[in-house]
Amino acid sequence: MCVQSVEHQSSLHVEDILLIALKKIEDVSCTKAMIYSGFYSGIGLSVLEEDLPDETINPRLWKKLISIDAKLNLILEKLIQNSDGFNQAQNRQVSLNEEDVRILTPDVFATGDLVEIKMLLPLNSPVWVVIYGMVSQFRIIVSEENEVWIRLSEMADDVKQIMGYYLFNRQREIVRKLRLASEKSAIKPKKL
């Protein structure tokens, strides 16, 4: 078993609702968390200069071929999404930091279970991350609603960076909303 904690203590902590697919696995096999690169790979990419048609190709035909290529890439990404279990993801309430995550789920786990978490982080360009960990606590709240705490295993540097970026920006957004709400309540007009 290769579950390791992140080396530094994180002060960034966020409560949120995220799109998550959670499943028990048999062995982490020292698998590190990763960004799932199969998504959004073709969006926003420009055609490379060597991909431009020469004067023998009709420009209308070329535009049609580019359009067909883009649509085929989207179909392939959807097929990958279905085969890799991303279509199983549901909105779940989470409490997240760089070391562990608490998830409310109807699924049942036992302490020590190894799990895979596929999570969509709502950044400027949403990105799926796949992280692994071990169940450290499990509690049944009510029927079909359980609380599971997962200690995250080691993450690749790019995942740490994206998670840190999400946590920092989300925490900043929450603080900004709380500040605005307190300013609005302090500015209420006085009755005469």
Image (cartoon, grey):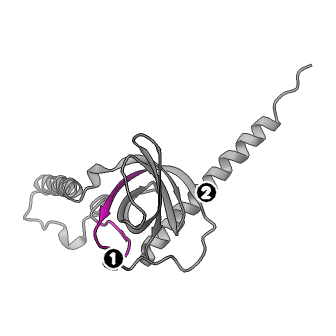
Q: Which mark is residue 31?
A: 1
Left-right relation of 166 to 72: right
Residue neighbourhood size for the residue with mark 2, other residues' Cα within 10 Å, grouped as few (<14), some (14–19), many (≥20): some
Going 92% across and 19% down the picture, which residue do you hit? 192
Is residue 29 in view from this perspective? yes
Q: Position of residue 3 (x, y in %)?
A: 42, 76
Q: What is the magenta range? A: 19-37
> Closer to the camera, 111 or 91?
111
Identify whether 25 is placed above or below 148.
below
Q: Amino acid at mark 2?
A: Gln
Identify whether 108 is placed above or below 99.
above
Q: Which mark is residue 101?
A: none
> Closer to the camera, 5 or 123?
5
> Closer to the camera, 133 or 189?
133
| Disc 2 target residue | 171
What kind of element bears circle 1? loop
